Amino acid sequence: MKYLNATFVKSAEMLSQCPDTSLPEFPLLGRSNVGKSSFINALSNNKKLAKTSNTPGKTRLINYFNFSDKFHIADLPGYGYAKVSKEAQAKWQRYLEEYLLNRSQIKSLIQFIDSRHDIQKNDYQMREWVNAYNLPIITIATKIDYVPKNKVLNVITNIKKEFGGVVLPFSSANNRYNDDIFDWLLAN
């Protein structure tokens, strides 16, 4: 199994605060508690690198992680749930749109879908927004270890049918999918 040494770089609220780097960048999109922080921790083999929580909406900034000077992963605030005002949500949306549309280091967005459930309305809305701007994107099917083995292929096939493109399974409990994910990240 592959791992890369990863370090926390910084948090940024808006594009102007993002790190000055030429490394390829992969922003993580997904609903709150879909497993973005667990993904970072599993790829780095460090359960304490990215903060995880059972409470949705904890990530409120763009959190940067450097993976062995090969690429950055940018953990974005989750969509769909946050106990903050409409005003704060509108501000996040404005800052995130500016970041996603103007950050030249971004190689591909990575959207996380919880494989235990049907694709949610806000997942579709996010994908429609991404497609409207023709941004590169792949999908990670998280929590795949909770899906019965005989249904994993059906889940992946359904997500591919709905979203197209590359769909990779992921489990933070079982790292057997990490090699395929690393191969994709390092090739892009």
Image: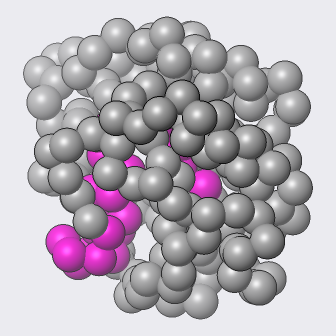
Side (left or right) of 4 relative to 49: right
Residue at 74% across, 24% down: 129
Span of residues in magenta? 27-50
The answer to which of 156 and 69 lies nearer the viewer is 69
Q: Quadrant of residue 48?
A: bottom left
Residue 75 lies, with reference to residue 151, above or below; the image says below
Q: Quadrant of residue 71?
A: bottom right
The answer to which of 23 and 80 lies nearer the viewer is 80
Q: Quadrant of residue 99?
A: bottom right
The answer to which of 91 and 17 lies nearer the viewer is 91
The quadrant of the image that shows the N terminus is: bottom left
Residue at 50% across, 68% down: 63
Indicate the colouring scheme: one colour
- Could you say where residue 65 lies in the image, as x and y percent from the top left? 49, 76
- Could you say where residue 57 lies in the image, as x and y percent from the top left? 35, 43
Residue 35 lies, with reference to residue 183, above or below; the image says above
- Could you say where residue 30 lies in the image, as x and y percent from the top left? 47, 37
Residue at 43% across, 83% down: 8
- Could you say where residue 104 lies in the image, as x and y percent from the top left? 87, 64
Q: How many marks?
A: 0
Is residue 101 among what the camera can see? Answer: yes
Side (left or right) of 74 relative to 149: right
The quadrant of the image that shows the C terminus is: bottom right
Is residue 138 among what the camera can see? Answer: no
The answer to which of 175 and 120 lies nearer the viewer is 120
Side (left or right) of 183 relative to 147: right
Q: Is residue 142 magenta?
A: no
Residue at 87% across, 55% down: 102
Residue 155 lies, with reference to residue 146, above or below; the image says above
Q: Is residue 39 magenta?
A: yes
